[in-house]
């Protein structure tokens, strides 16, 4: 079985490639390296002792993508490639719509031309409307996104739904990720954000290692037990394994299915800081700062549908996530860069 993994050099893609290879599947990566390094692929090979085929291609490049489909007998596709920074999407909406929508459209057209009909799409909890009660079910309201990034995920879901409506023999799985953190236990692959991290966990670990002076905790006056926001953090290896489960499900399940990939447990910002300190025996300097625009007070998944239908549940807890993030950070203080 050969899986085409777009965006496979990225954070979630590289961890997923490890799990696919360890399950005996072959992996073909297409990535333009706009937010990643080819070193991730070499590390994936090192962990698994199996080869990875890599094409440095923009998914929107129709001709070169077509060539990949001609060269390889692709059984299914996992589409991770995309831009993902919420704040940047507000400043550069056209780049986000262009990249995230056109990559999905060109990919689906190329799949159709080659008779490949199975795809897993990286969606996000961000497609849920902010006015839902918690936990979020796959049936909770979607839309009313607060930024262009969120809208690109919302529209891509619709594009894929419409592909199924036009040809019901397609199998489409939309995976809505909550907050992926952590790294592979080997410490060889992990999250390597460019510039100042937007997300909490890389900011915590860069502060702990001294690359950042202090963590700003955005808001301590929310209506939550300790006043800081609550999120559903999920270990990236658990998330990666969710894709393996989804691949098994694609077989024999034509149509469109949506699954949350979360733990079902919410943790506050302060709980994450404390967990990081306890797991790694260190101190993370922090201060309270004003709320960040657009943040919801609480967001967590109901993961029961994934458990029942995909037979997948997250195994790791927040201590594991903090330990593995720190292991990656200390072994690779500058990420994949050497200096
Ligand atoms: P990432 O930036 O590490 O990985 C994305 C990869 O896609 C990168 O390697 C990048 O170089 C590549 N890419 C981007 N545009 C491309 C294009 N046009 N052609 C080829 N390659 C391209 O991000 P990630 O955290 O691994 O996220 C993977 C997917 O999951 C993204 O679609 C993201 O939106 C989605 N997602 C991420 C999170 C999260 O918090 N990390 C949460 C929900 C959903
Ligand atoms: C978590 C909490 C912050 C940084 C984002 C995207 C979402 C999805 C996952 C892709 C919040 C607080 C953060 C800091 C802080 N990505 N925080 N200080 O916002 O839940 O989700 O990533 O699909 O679409 O919006 O994650 O890690 O940015 O923030 O206090 O320096 O940590 O306010 O409460 P978020 P995050």
Image (cartoon, rainbow, N blue to C red):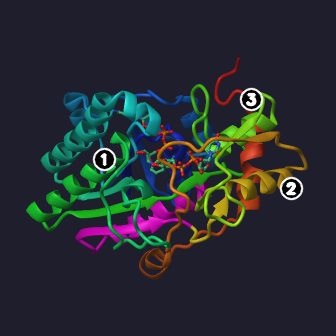
Q: Is residue 223 above or below residue 30?
A: below
- Where disc 1 sits, the SS reads helix
* Residues shaded magenta: 234-262
Using a 10 Å C-alpha cutoff, classify the residue at mark 3 as few (fewer than 14 neighbours), some (14 to 19) or many (20 or more): some
Q: Farthest right residue?
A: 281
Question: Circle 3 sits on which residue?
Answer: 212
Q: Farthest left residue?
A: 166
Question: Circle 1 sits on which residue?
Answer: 151
Occupied quadrant, residue 107:
top left
- Where disc 3 sits, the SS reads loop
Q: Position of residue 130 (x, y in %)?
A: 41, 60
Which one is earlier in the sequence, the residue at label 2 or at label 3? 3
Of 166 and 54, nearer the camera is 166
| Residue at horizontal 14 percent and vertical 68 percent from the top | 168
Question: Circle 2 sits on which residue?
Answer: 278
Q: Is mark 3 within 8 Å of ligand 2?
A: no
Q: Position of residue 45 (x, y in %)?
A: 58, 41
């Amino acid at each position: 079985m050969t899986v085409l993994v777009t965006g496979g050099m990225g954070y979630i893609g590289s961890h997923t490639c490890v799990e696919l290879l360890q399950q005996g599947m072959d992996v073909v990566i297409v990535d333009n390296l706009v937010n990643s390094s080819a070193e991730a692929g070499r590390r994936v090979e090192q962990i698994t002792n199996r080869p990875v085929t890599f094409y440095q291609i923009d998914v929107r490049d129709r001709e070169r993508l077509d060539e990949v489909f001609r060269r390889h007998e692709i059984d299914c596709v996992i589409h991770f490639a995309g831009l993902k920074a919420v704040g940047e999407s507000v400043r550069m909406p056209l780049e986000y719509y262009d990249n995230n929508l056109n990559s999905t459209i060109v990919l689906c057209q190329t799949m159709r031309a080659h008779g490949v009909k199975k795809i897993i799409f990286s969606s996000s909890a961000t497609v849920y409307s902010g006015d839902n009660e918690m936990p979020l079910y796959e049936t909770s309201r979607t839309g009313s996104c607060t930024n262009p990034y969120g809208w690109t995920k919302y529209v891509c879901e619709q594009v894929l739904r419409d592909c199924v409506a036009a040809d019901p023999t397609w199998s489409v799985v939309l995976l809505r990720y909550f907050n992926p953190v952590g790294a592979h236990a080997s410490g060889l692959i992990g999250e390597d954000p460019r510039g100042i991290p937007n997300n909490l966990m890389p900011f915590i670990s860069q502060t702990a290692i001294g690359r950042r002076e202090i963590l700003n905790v955005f808001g301590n006056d929310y209506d939550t037990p300790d006043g800081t926001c609550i999120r559903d953090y999920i270990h990236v290896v658990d998330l990666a394994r969710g894709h393996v489960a989804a691949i098994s499900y694609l077989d024999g399940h034509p149509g469109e299915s949506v699954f949350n990939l979360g733990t079902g447990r919410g943790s506050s910002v302060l709980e994450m800081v404390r967990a990081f300190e306890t797991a790694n025996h260190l101190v993370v300097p922090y201060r309270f700062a004003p709320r960040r625009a657009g943040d919801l007070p609480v967001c967590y998944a109901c993961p029961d549908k994934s458990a029942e239908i995909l037979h997948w549940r997250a195994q790791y807890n927040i201590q594991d996530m903090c330990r593995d993030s720190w292991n990656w950070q200390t072994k690779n203080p500058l990420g994949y860069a050497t200096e």
